[in-house]
Image: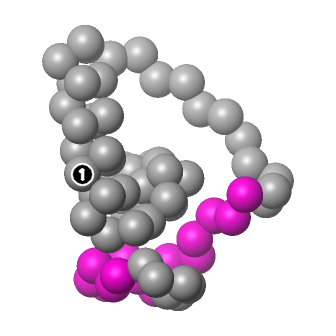
């Protein structure tokens, strides 16, 4: 699904994108400071280069993890 001015980025564009106001759950993860900074930097770049939302990036991270581990 591609809405608004968001640019397409690949096969993951077929995923359902979260929308503000959706019934969303919080997930807290603990990680090393260097991984935290790398994630923040990477997500900032993706958001500004593609126009995707922060919620969309977080959703993709969890979906990719679950797919990678066959969950």
| Residue occupying the point 55% across, 24% down | 28
Q: What stretch is highlighted in magenta?
A: 7-20
Up/down of 26 relative to 31, above or below: below
Answer yes or no: is residue 31 visible. yes
Answer yes or no: is residue 63 visible. no
| Residue occupying the point 55% across, 53% down | 55
Query: Residue 23 vs residue 27: left or right?
Result: right
Please check the rendered image and state whether residue 50 is part of the magenta-colored stretch, yes or no: no
* Residue 35 spot, x, y in % from top left: 22, 24
Sort mark 1 into few (<14), some (14-19) or many (20+) by Cα contacts within 10 Å.
few
Element at label 1 = helix
Please check the rendered image and state whether residue 12 is part of the magenta-colored stretch, yes or no: yes
Pick whichever, 65 or 22, lies toward us: 22
Where residue 60 sits, quadrant-wise, is bottom left
* Residue 14 spot, x, y in % from top left: 46, 85
* Residue 18 spot, x, y in % from top left: 63, 64
Pick whichever, 62 or 37, lies toward us: 37
| Residue occupying the point 57% across, 71% down | 17
| Residue occupying the point 26% across, 64% down | 49
Where residue 63 sits, quadrant-wise, is bottom left
Query: Residue 21 vs residue 26: left or right?
Result: right
Q: How many marks?
A: 1
Display coloring: one colour
Where residue 6 sits, quadrant-wise, is bottom left
Up/down of 15 relative to 60, above or below: below
Secondary structure that dominates the magenta span? loop
Pick whichever, 53 or 69, lies toward us: 53
Residue assigned mark 1:
45
């Amino acid at each position: 699904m591609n809405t608004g001015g968001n640019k397409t980025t690949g096969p993951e564009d077929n995923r359902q994108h979260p929308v503000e106001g959706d019934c969303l759950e919080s997930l807290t993860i603990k990680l090393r400071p260097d991984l935290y900074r790398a994630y923040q930097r990477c997500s900032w770049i993706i958001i500004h280069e593609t126009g995707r939302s922060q919620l969309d990036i977080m959703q993709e991270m969890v979906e990719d993890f679950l797919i990678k581990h066959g969950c």
